[in-house]
């Protein structure tokens, strides 16, 4: 049976619960196995997870299934070479992946500081949703702006210059792409901090007050009646920054050098210790994707880029010996931004192809920055491509 599996199937996942008994009535060790009937390729990587604690808990089991960080569990990406496993037991250990992770962490002695990242604005009533309609009564519809307004809604309010000062350009994943943010925003946020917990603070803004008063029945902010729930430190939304999408199929870090206000669906990075374009290239690389997949937070095959993984990404110190690599990364990020900014990018396949080529060049520079060899690069690329 073992040889039949090796010859005729491709192993997709092995989830080993170790000494934890899944079924109370059966004292046998349990494993979940996923296979695909396929004789190709001859060499491939697969997802192998196992509980390594001698006294596992139910939480360990749940974390194993979610691939959540847990010191009682082990997450590996073993390599199968079919002929090498014929007539041999299927045993896997910390080999290639763990070696590479250790090497990345050895080279990356720098980390982001807690005061260099922040989660986006917690609103939480951005638009009218179905549950609001009962409380609001007639005259409202799903999608109407509460704290977040469309251009049309903004214009209808006929705001004074003083009132316009409270409206800030608001961006979503529609404008925030990998590497580059579309400057033209289509929405605006009424940016009111905790001062607006005092109703008198809204008196100089009568049209905004009138607008928000219509929605008092559904506003749940700690800073109600007029303040956002968590407005955050405004300096993070101004000037040069990197915006990270929290839940994504691939790590998506966006460089922005203009005022850009975002929701809690994003984290914002702002640091003076690294060139921000260099950091954008580094964070968007396959090497960092690999590290996040194995050492960050995952929900199935989706990345969850919260504060903890962001603060733990190993960043190499820049020295005279690797400064030239950093400069090349910056130049290539500039090239990508320039291409994506062009008016015909969405319809120009040549430019899209060129961006992919430059991304690969950045990946190779990042591998060099961490001192990885060709075999280690192949393991990273194969591991990511197999997901």
Image (spheres, rainbow, N blue to C red):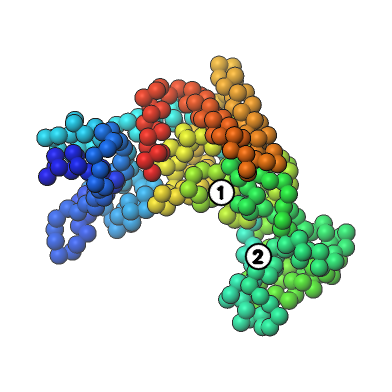
Q: Position of residue 23 (x, y in %)?
A: 19, 62
Pinpoint residue 96: horizontal percent, then vertical percent. 32, 31
Q: Is residue 344 among what the camera can see?
A: yes
- Please tell me the numbered disc located at residue 178: none
Residue under label 1: 245
The 10 Å Cα crowd at callout 2, few under 14, some 14 to 19, many 20 or more, is some
In the picture, measured across the screen, residue 120 lies left or right of residue 309, that is: right
User: What residue is drawn where x is 55% and y is 16%?
Assistant: 321
The secondary element bearing badge 2 is classed as loop
How crowded is the residue under tag 1: few (<14 C-alpha within 10 Å), some, or many (20+)? Answer: many
Task: Between residue 190 and residue 87, name the one nearer to us.
Answer: 87
Residue pointed to by mark 2: 126
Residue at 40% x, 39% y: name it: 385
**Position above or below: 53 against 86:** below
Quarter of the figure that contains the N terminus? top left
Quadrant housing the C terminus: top left
Instruction: Decide if residue 112 is on the left or right side of residue 384.
Output: right
Q: Look at the numbered disc 1 and give the secondary structure of its residue.
A: strand
* Mark nearer the N terminus (1 vs 2): 2
Q: Residue at x 73, y 76 (%)?
A: 214
In this orientation, does residue 53 appear?
A: no
Name the spot of residue 100 as percent of width and height, x first.
38, 30
Residues 364 and 36: in front is 36
Q: Taking 196 as reference, is 110 above or below it? A: above
For this view, does 294 lie left or right of residue 342?
left
Tell me which residue sits at (56%, 49%) in the image. Answer: 245
Residue 333, located in which quarter of the rendered image? top right
Disc 1 to disc 2, C-alpha distance? 18 Å
Q: Tell which residue pokes out farthest to the right in this image.
A: 161
Q: Could you say where residue 298 lies in the image, as x and y percent from the top left?
A: 42, 49
Task: Determine which quarter of the picture holds residue 382.
Answer: top left
Q: Quadrant of residue 324?
A: top right
């Amino acid at each position: 049976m073992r040889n039949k599996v090796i010859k005729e199937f491709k192993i997709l996942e092995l989830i080993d619960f170790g000494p934890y008994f899944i079924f109370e009535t059966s004292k046998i060790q349990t494993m979940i196995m996923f296979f695909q009937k396929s004789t190709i390729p001859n060499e491939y990587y697969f997802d192998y997870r196992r509980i390594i604690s001698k006294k596992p808990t139910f939480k360990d089991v749940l974390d194993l299934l979610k691939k959540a960080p847990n010191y009682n569990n082990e997450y590996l990406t073993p390599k199968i070479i079919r002929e090498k496993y014929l007539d041999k037991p299927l045993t896997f250990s910390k080999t290639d992946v763990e070696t590479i992770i250790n090497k990345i962490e050895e080279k990356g002695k720098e980390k982001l500081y807690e005061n260099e990242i922040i989660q986006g604005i917690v609103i939480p009533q951005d638009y009218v949703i179905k549950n609001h309609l009962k409380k609001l009564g007639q005259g409202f519809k799903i999608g109407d702006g509460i704290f977040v307004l469309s251009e049309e809604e903004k214009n209808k309010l006929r705001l004074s210059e003083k009132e316009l000062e409270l409206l800030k350009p608001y961006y979503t994943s529609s404008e925030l792409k990998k590497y580059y943010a579309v400057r033209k925003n289509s929405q605006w946020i009424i940016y009111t901090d905790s001062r607006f917990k005092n109703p008198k603070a809204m008196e100089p803004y009568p049209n905004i007050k009138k607008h928000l008063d219509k929605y008092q029945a559904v506003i749940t902010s700690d800073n109600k009646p007029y303040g956002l729930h968590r407005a955050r430190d405004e300096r993070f939304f101004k000037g040069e920054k990197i915006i990270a999408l929290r839940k994504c199929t691939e790590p998506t870090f966006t460089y922005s050098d203009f005022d850009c206000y975002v929701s809690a669906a994003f984290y914002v990075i702002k640091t003076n210790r690294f060139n921000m374009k260099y950091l954008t290239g580094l964070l968007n690389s396959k090497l960092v994707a690999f590290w996040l997949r194995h050492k960050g937070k995952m929900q199935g095959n989706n990345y969850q880029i919260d504060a903890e993984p962001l603060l733990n990404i190993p960043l190499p110190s820049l020295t005279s010996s690797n400064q030239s690599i950093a400069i090349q990364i910056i130049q290539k990020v500039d090239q990508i931004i320039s291409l994506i900014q062009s008016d015909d990018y969405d319809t120009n396949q040549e430019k899209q192809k060129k961006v992919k080529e430059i991304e690969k060049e950045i990946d190779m520079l990042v591998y060099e920055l961490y001192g990885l060899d060709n075999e280690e690069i192949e393991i990273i690329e194969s591991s990511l491509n197999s997901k």
